[in-house]
Image (cartoon, grey):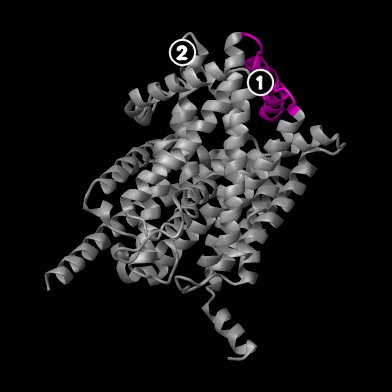
């Protein structure tokens, strides 16, 4: 086949509607925020109130429900289904698989929140009323909001995607295809298009939230560390562009490049934690308060999962729990697809329980070590980070001051900067890969998206974050982008789970009939 014929064949397989509509919508929203920043932020805030406050129970029920479903899938007849051919062995070792899974599911914002989230809880009226000692509950909520329920979103959908790809060998790598067993032929029609458009828009919204939250911390580190006389906003934009170049390079080089970056990232991540544990002088407090917070979270898990504050005495679940469930839901567009893709050869039980061990374990360790380092200093009276935060509300400056308390803080600033860049690169190369797959009507199991389409999505991922940074959106409005986008995704997630159960039952019956012959 000639080069022109190959080019036409590839072009004919591209779904231009799925590719161009999100592009136009995101570019339009970005331009609107740049031209009318105050008006745009007001509109986002009003829409967020409707979804997050009026319909908040929707997110809470989905969160607890999917966690329960994950346990049922693991210990039921579905748990022994191999994602691939019978007797097939996993391609990746547990460590490599876990590293890729963890780093694709979490971005640099985990470091931002690990350092500072307890401060935001300690200054919240709801948390301060729960105990006289701030260490009692301020360290519990980060563990709750970043552990079992949000990771269950990833793992249950990863199983559904993995089953679709490796057991059913479906070539349309999209949300609509995963819903096919339940919606039937409508997956090829208008309903399927709507599902995929919602998915892609949510993917871009989740990316914007993550970039907008954590990148200014990287800018603060660079400005302060290198003594650059440039505004934080300008440095943030430069970082976005550099990070885009790194993850673009990785995704073009396929899963090999991604796995190498994932290992580098995980070594930096755990090395950073070990350094704070051994050098920071808070080792005993970190370990003991971490164990206590983890125990308190497990003891109160159901109460924390269902707390709604119907009288709106503090609006804590609306401001935090609902936001977090929505935040992880929009990330479910890319992360579960990627996890399912790399999980070939593993059983459903191994994917879910292995994901909890590596994913939840690694996430919790970050909040226990990095969070309790500064919480220990606050408790001992050697530093007053709460007053620093209450004085100006600048979390980025607060985190910078926390890091500066470490011996040899300059080296730690550089290590954290490298770790954040690695996290961004490993997260967004998997996102760009997933988004590029959506642009194709069909894509074989071992076939990769074209470079041109991949480059288009790599660039599109940073457009909305840049707009949010320039419009100086508040933390509340940055969070709102995820809450709004997650509402339709919750419905699609439910349909996808129903589709998987229906198809898995059929698959098991087919295997049983084959064995009986």
Residue at point 33% right, 72% down? 185
- Placement of 337 over or under 217, stated as above or below: below
Write the start and end of the magenta stretch as one range. Answer: 381-409
In the orientation shown, which residue stands out farthest toward the bottom?
1
Residue at point 32% right, 28% down? 302
- Placement of 388 over or under 183, stated as above or below: above
Q: In which quarter of the image is residue 267?
A: top right
Question: Callout 1: helix, strand or loop?
Answer: helix
What type of secondary structure mainly makes up the magenta span? helix
Q: Relative to the observer, which residue lies in front, 237 or 415? A: 415
* Left or right: 130 as drawn, with respect to 205: left
Q: Distance between the residues labelled 2 and 1?
A: 19 Å
| Horizontal and vertical percent position of residue 56 | 41, 36
Q: Name the residue under label 2.
A: 129
* Left or right: 160 as drawn, with respect to 236: left
| Horizontal and vertical percent position of residue 444 | 46, 73
Q: Quadrant of residue 216?
A: top right
């Amino acid at each position: 086949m000639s080069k022109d014929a190959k080019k036409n064949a590839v072009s004919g397989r591209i779904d231009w509607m799925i590719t161009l509509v999100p592009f136009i919508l995101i570019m339009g929203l970005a331009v609107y925020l740049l031209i009318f920043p105050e008006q745009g932020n007001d509109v986002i805030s009003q829409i967020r109130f409707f979804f997050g406050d009026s319909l908040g129970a929707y997110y809470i029920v989905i969160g607890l429900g999917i966690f329960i479903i994950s346990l049922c899938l693991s210990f039921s007849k579905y748990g022994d289904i191999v994602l691939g051919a019978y007797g097939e062995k996993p391609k990746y070792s547990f460590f490599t698989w876990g590293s890729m899974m963890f780093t694709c599911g979490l971005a640099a914002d985990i470091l931002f929140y690990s350092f500072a989230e307890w401060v935001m809880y300690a200054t919240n009226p709801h948390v301060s009323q729960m105990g006289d000692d701030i260490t009692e509950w301020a360290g519990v909520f980060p563990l709750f909001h970043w552990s079992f329920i949000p990771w269950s979103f990833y793992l249950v959908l990863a199983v559904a995607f993995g089953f679709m790809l490796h057991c059913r060998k479906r070539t349309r790598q999209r949300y609509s295809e995963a819903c096919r067993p339940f919606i039937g032929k409508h997956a090829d029609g208008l309903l399927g298009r709507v599902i995929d458009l919602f998915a892609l828009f949510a993917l871009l919204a989740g990316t914007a939230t993550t970039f907008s939250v954590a990148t200014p911390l990287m800018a603060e580190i660079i400005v302060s560390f290198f003594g650059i006389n440039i505004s934080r906003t300008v440095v943030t934009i430069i970082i976005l562009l550099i990070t885009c170049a790194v993850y673009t390079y990785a995704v073009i080089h396929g899963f090999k490049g991604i796995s190498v970056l994932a290992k580098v990232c995980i070594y930096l991540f755990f090395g950073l934690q070990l350094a704070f544990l051994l050098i920071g002088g808070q080792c005993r407090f970190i370990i003991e308060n971490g164990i206590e917070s983890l125990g308190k979270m497990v003891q109160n898990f159901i109460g924390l999962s269902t707390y709604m504050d119907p009288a709106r005495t503090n609006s804590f679940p609306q401001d935090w729990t609902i936001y977090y469930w929505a935040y992880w839901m929009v990330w479910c567009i890319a992360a579960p697809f990627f996890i399912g893709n790399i999980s070939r050869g593993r059983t459903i039980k191994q994917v879910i329980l292995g994901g909890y061990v590596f994913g939840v374990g690694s996430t919790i360790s970050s909040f226990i070590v990095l969070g309790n380092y500064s919480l220990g200093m606050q408790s001992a009276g050697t530093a007053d980070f709460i007053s620093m935060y209450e004085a100006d509300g600048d979390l980025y400056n607060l985190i910078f001051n926390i890091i500066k308390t470490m011996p040899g803080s300059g080296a730690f600033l550089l290590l954290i900067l490298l770790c954040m860049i690695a996290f961004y690169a490993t997260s967004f190369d998997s996102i760009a890969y997933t988004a590029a797959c959506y642009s194709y009507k069909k894509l074989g199991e071992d076939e990769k998206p074209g470079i041109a389409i991949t480059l288009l999505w790599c660039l599109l991922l940073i457009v909305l974050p840049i707009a949010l940074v320039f419009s100086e959106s508040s933390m509340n409005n940055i969070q709102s982008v995820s809450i709004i986008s997650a509402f339709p995704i919750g419905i699609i997630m439910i349909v996808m789970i129903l589709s998987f159960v229906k198809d898995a039952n059929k698959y098991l019956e087919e295997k049983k009939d084959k064995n009986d012959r």
